[in-house]
Image: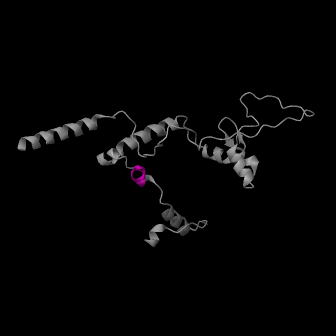
Amino acid sequence: MPKARGFTAIALIAVLALSACGGRNKDPQLMHIRSNTSGPDEFTILPGKPLESPDFDAELPAPTPGGTNLTDPTPKADAVAALGGNLARVATTGPNNIGRGDGGLVNHARRFGVNQNIRRTLAAEDLAFRRDHKGRVFERWFNINVYLKAYRKVSLDQHRELERFRRLGVRTPSAPPDPKLFQ
């Protein structure tokens, strides 16, 4: 009987050791959201606009290589138009697709220079952060979401920040109350 228990304990340790060896080269996943189906994501499918017959009395517009098509979906512009917004502010300009109304803001943000490799730098820093905060063993085994716990120290407490601005005398819009006050 003691031999059987010893053999079972050794087998269990061997299985645990082998299971810990797999997946070392994978990027750490803090969010465990997966689709159960192999089909397309229904939220990424945008229907095209209906085709229109051109007025033959008017001239057809000149083709624009790389430009947009009249039947291409424009969900952002359609939403702004439906809500009564200004479509001119939605139109983008330049290679970076900066909104026409946002050029001054972007220029002000760029006044001290722009790091061209910022996306690569941030991706590498975030990968290192996720590797350091990938969760405990059982959290990884049972696919427990550790995203909010990992980023808690670097996230902004919106209610504390709102109170700080109000103490400084900054006019702030109304906000929902802090749920901690009702616990």
Q: Is residue 153 left or right of residue 10?
A: right
Q: Residue at the location (61% across, 46% down)?
A: 109
Above or below 8: residue 183: below
Instruction: Give whichever of 102, 112 is nearer the camera.
Output: 102
Secondary structure mostly seen in the magenta stretch: helix
Q: Does the magenta portion include 124?
A: no
Question: Left of 80 or right of it: where is 11?
Answer: left
User: Magenta segment: does it hold 152?
Assistant: yes
Residue in view at x 30 percent, y 48 percent: 138
Which quadrant of the view contains residue 22? top left
Which is more toward the observer, 36 or 163? 36
Image height check: is 23 above or below 101?
Answer: above
Percent x, y of residue 56? 90, 32
For the point 55% across and 38% down, the residue is 40
Farthest left residue? 2
**Residue 62 position in % (x across, y down):** 82, 29
Left or right of residue 164, residue 99 in this image: right
Query: What residue span does the magenta drawing correspond to?
Result: 145-153
In-image side of 53 versus 101 (left or right): right
